[in-house]
Image: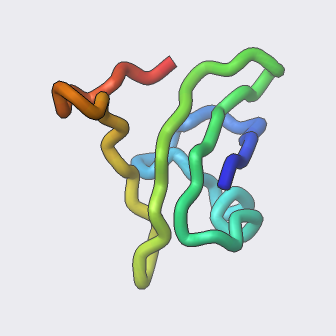
Amino acid sequence: MFYHSHTSPRSVSGLTQIDERSIPETFALVVFAPHGNALSYRGFKRGLLNWQELRIEADQTAKQLPRL
């Protein structure tokens, strides 16, 4: 699932309550673009109580990839 948020990733999870309600799927790749330009992207998984950020890693090296 791909989701485009017009808010900045300011909270710990990066998702606002509107974002959390708007994503029905268990997994989401969220691009934060408050003014049209992408500032950041993050992967998320819906947990029992809240969303958790996922590490985005390169396959071969298992190094965490930088955010935009």
Tally the marks.
0
Looking at the picture, how far across and down is residue 41, in whole percent? 54, 32
Q: As rendered, which of 40 and 26 lies closer to the eye?
A: 26
Color style of the picture: rainbow
Residue drawn at x 55%, y 71% as measured from the top left: 26
Residue drawn at x 66%, y 55% as measured from the top left: 1
Question: Going 39% across and 60% down the picture, which residue do you hit?
Answer: 52
Quadrant housing residue 62: top left
The percent position of residue 27, horizontal first and vertical second, equals 53, 62
Q: Nearer the viewer, residue 55 or 18?
A: 55
Displayed quadrant of residue 35: top right
Q: Where does residue 47 sit, x and y in percent of width and height?
A: 42, 75
Q: Is residue 43 left or right of residue 7?
A: left
Q: Looking at the image, which residue sits at the far right?
A: 36
Q: Residue at x 44, y 23 (%)?
A: 67
Residue 14, above or below 49: above
